[in-house]
Amino acid sequence: MANIRDIAKQADVSVTTVSRVINEHPYVSKEKRQRVHAAMAELGYLRNQQALTLSTGRTQRFVVVLPYMDHPYYGLFVNGLAKAALVKGYRLVMWQTEYKLDQERQALDLLKHREVDGAILLSHAMLFEELETYRSFGPVSVATVGAPETISSVHVDHYAAFVAGLHVLTQAGYEDIGIVLSRQSSPSSIARQRAYFDEVASARERWVWTGYLTSEDGIRLAAEFLQRKERPRALFLSSDYVALGFLGEMHRRGVGIPEDVAILGFDGHPISQAFGLSTMHAPHEEIGRALFDVTFDGMDGGAVRAQSLTVTYLSGTTL
C-alpha cells in the first residue's frame, strides 16, 4: 500500500507538504494540493486513521448520546450536528441509550479512553454531578437545561417556550387548557408544568398527561382523552409526533378539530405543516450546529458557553 513518501515522489512535493494536505493544513497552495490529491487517487492511498490519531492526538470523532435514534425529534438535532461535522471533517458516533445509565456511562467512556474527542448529549438520565466527572477527559456539551458552569449547553428555555405557547392558546380564546408531556420528572417537563400552573387560571392536575413520546402514544391519548367526562377545551402537546397521532385518531373517531378540541404542538417539525398542525417551532437544527461548534472549540480550551434559543409560533388549522 502506498505511503506518504510514495505520494510525495508521485506529486513532486515534499513529505511535509503531503502531510499538510492529508491533515487539511491551510497553508498549502491550490496547485500543490491538487497534485497531492491526484497522486493519492492514482496510487490508491487510504489514510491510516490510527496513525493520524497518534500524530495529532485527535480522533476526529464526537460521540452523540441520545435516548432514541428512531424518534424524529432527535433527527432535527442530528441534522444540525451532521452538517457542522461535515464542515470540520468530523464523524459522529451515535449511541442510543433509552435513558439507561449504564449505556450513558459506556458512551462517555469513549471520551475517557480517548476514542472520541468530545461528547454531546441530547438528552440524558445521568445527573450533572456525575457528568462533570467526564469533563477532565475532553469537552462535554448538552442540549438540556440546568447544566453547571463547567458544561456547555445549548437549549430552549422550556419554561419561557411553554409560556409563549400558552399565550397563543389564551389569545385564541381558550381558557380550559391541558398539557401533554413525555417524561414526568425531566427538567424540561418540570419547567413546562411550572409554566402551566403559573399561566393558566383553570390549570388542573388531572389535565396534565405524562408519558407520551410517540405518534402511537398520541393514538392512545385520544382514547384516554375521550373517556374523560370533564375535558379541557385545548391541548398543548410537547411533541409534534404525539400531536399528529392524537390528531389522526380524533379524525378517525369523527371528533372535530378545533371545534371540539384545539391542538397546539411543539417542535415545528416540517411534517407538522403538511398536516396543518399549529405548533411552536423550536430551532433544533440550529441547536445541533451550535452544540457541535461549542464542543469543537472546547478542544482548544474554548470558553464554556450557555446559550438559550427562542421558539416561534407556526399557525395551522388545529386552533
Image (tube, rainbow, N blue to C red):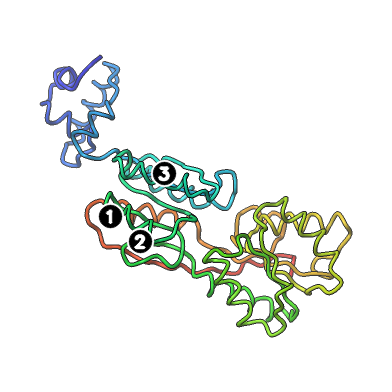
Q: Secondary structure at mark 1?
A: helix
**Tag 3 secondary structure:** helix
Count residues near mark 1 (Cα–Cα under 10 Å), then give few for <14, some for 14-19, many for 20+: many
Q: Position of residue 228 (x, y in %)?
A: 84, 68
Evaluate if marks 1 and 2 touch, with contact meaning CB atoms under 8 Å apart. Answer: yes
Q: Which mark is residue 152?
A: 2
Read off the residue under disc 3.
107
Q: Earlier in the sequence, mark 3 or mark 2?
A: 3
Q: Nearer the viewer, residue 267 or 232?
A: 232
For residue 148, side relative to residue 180 (left or right): left
10 Å crowding of disc 3: few (<14), some (14-19), many (20+): many
Q: Which mark is residue 5?
A: none
- The amino acid type found where label 1 is placed reads Gly
Report how far apart the C-alphas of labels 3 and 1 lie in the structure. Answer: 19 Å
Residue at 26% x, 26% y: name it. 37
Q: Earlier in the sequence, mark 3 or mark 1?
A: 3
Image coords of residue 1 (percent x, y): 25, 14
Q: Is residue 190 above or below residue 284?
A: below
Q: Amino acid at mark 3?
A: Ala
Q: Mark on residue 298?
A: 1
Quadrant housing residue 253? bottom right
Residue 301 relative to residue 152: left or right: left
> Residue at the location (50% across, 61% down)?
283
Q: Of the residues shown, which amino acid type is indicated by label 2?
A: Ser
Above or below, 214 against 309 in this view is above
